[in-house]
Image (cartoon, rainbow, N blue to C red):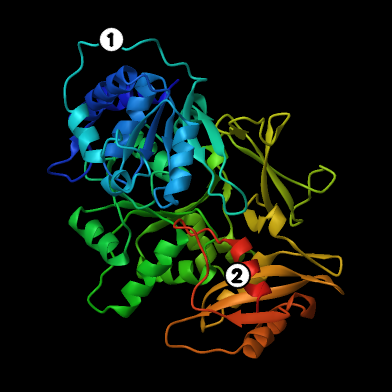
Amino acid sequence: MDLGLLLDMAVSGDPDRVVLGTADQGMTAQELQQRARNGAVAVQEAGAAHLMFVGSSGPAFPVALFAAAAAGVPLVPLNYRMPGEQIAALIAENEPALVIADAWLRDSGAVGPDALTPEQWLERTAVDRSDVPLVGAVDSDAVALLLYTSGTTAAPKAAVLRHRNLTSYVLSTIEFASADPSEASLVSVPPYHIAGVANTITNLYAGRRVIHLPTFTPEAWLETAHREGVTHALVVPTMLSRIVDHLEQDPAATAPKLRALAYGGATMPSRVIERALALFPDTGFVNAYGLTETSSTIALLGPDDHRAAGSSGDPEVRARLGSAGRAVPGIELEVRDEHGAPCPAGVAGDLWVSGEQVSGEYRGSAGNVVDGWFSTRDRGWLDAEGFLFIEGRTDDTIIRGGENIAPAEIEDVLQRHPSVADVAVVGLPDEEWGQRIAAAVVPRTGQTCSPEELQAWVRTHLRGSKTPDLVVLTDALPRTDTGKLLRRQVIADLSRS
């Protein structure tokens, strides 16, 4: 099965339903299908082996996604915020390519003069090319998507996602045509993020109209949600934190009446989700944990899980509010020790995952797949009921005096301090202990706290060996635009303290 077949199904179910954009001027499923075919002809005539998208969210992106599928070439979305030299290098790596890029990137010279702007792409795909035959059929094993990893710890590399990976994820997690005509989804994550791709596909398959927000601000998000009658939304933790702050600080701001609000992409502080649950009392919250290499979500903490954990007096059940939930259908999770043996419940180790939606493949390398199991390089543990708790990347573990310490545990304690807005805990080299614990802390606006106060706070909640040796107050932490912490930069900054 390929992505084009998912689009065909959407058209056969309701060809005139608006699936993209505003309710009154949006694009119908049939129009998306026709534009995708017209775009495939453009790719074919350009002799392109890849269709590249270097721009912000909007209707041009879904058209490009399905045009690439119809043409039988991979779509390659790039982070438009990267330096121009890096964008140019990645485009060269994928030549011959047809490039779609925001106008300012073309003007800067980063993408070349032949690149089409999203507006030009939409104009070209509006011209009927039904008279031109498409060459060949698309195989389910063909590459549908090349997504470059964020490069927070190394140079970006292209994760390979095949049509069977992406369609398997959709078919196992989404019910076809399950959305009623009034439903609309607001997608705020960028096109080069797997969640941006997955939400475009899954909402189309469900029959839910998608509104892409080109640039996120809490004001723009709230205004769009109210104006378009948004019922479902997807955000990353930093976005939800800013939305919550805005709603709490602006008396005129009101929360939209969402049916579901999904979040993922980075660790969600418990303090933020607890405040959000109070502000959106009738909304079903969903924590979606996944990776680029797994075609998006592999574990889910659903609305009932959120409410049960948030209202429970049992510490073990309440702790699940900070979990990634349980495996989605078709996925197996296993936590393994350093010898590769499965860990019992409650014991941390390396997370491995298996399932049809899992690729674990990179262009030019075999990836991290062994006997059908993919090493996520995340460290975590499962409780007795199968709820997954992520402690962070394996390489983030701090080894202090022979003891393995998860930064996430200390970060969670610090984030619960009333004066803390954001925090990162890392290990710094130490001659005596091997590593010492250091914390970079961003105070909340209008509040103050001292390093000594924060150290005492941690010592009260955790044993002394997990108390940071160094606490540095800072204005902001280095993060990607999808909220991922740049730990290497934090280590470099703290090393100079």
Which residue is depicted at the point 29% across and 60% down? 221
Please state the horizontal and vertical placement of residue 28, each as a whole percent of the image.
Answer: 20, 33
Which residue type does callout 2 highlight? Ala
Which residue is depicted at the point 25% across and 79% down? 251
Which residue is depicted at the point 62% across and 53% down? 153
Query: Which residue, given by chain and number where applicable, does mark 1 sit on?
Result: 133
Q: Looking at this view, is 379 or 132 the one in front?
A: 132
Q: Quadrant of the N terminus?
A: top left
Q: Quadrant of the C terminus?
A: bottom right
Q: Secondary structure at mark 1?
A: loop
Reply above or below: 357 against 384: above
Reply above or below: 425 against 481: below
Mark 1 and mark 2: Cα distance apart in space: 55 Å
Q: Secondary structure at mark 2?
A: strand
Near mark 2 (Cα within 10 A), the count class, few <14, some 14-19 or many ≥20, is many
Q: Which mark is residue 282?
A: none
Count of number-bearing discs: 2
Location of residue 4 (image quadrant): top left
Please state the horizontal and vertical placement of residue 242, each as a whole percent of the image.
Answer: 38, 69
Location of residue 369 (image quadrant): top right
Reply above or below: 73 against 200: above
Mark earlier in primary sequence (1, 2) = 1
Query: Which residue, given by chain and number where applicable, does mark 2 sit on?
Result: 424
Reply above or below: 313 against 17: below
Please state the horizontal and vertical placement of residue 473, each as a whole percent of the image.
Answer: 57, 82
In the image, is 379 to the left or to the right of 63?
A: right
Please state the horizontal and vertical placement of residue 73, each as a whole percent of the image.
Answer: 42, 23
Is residue 315 at all visible to an observer of this figure? no
Q: Looking at this view, is 212 or 153 the one in front?
A: 153
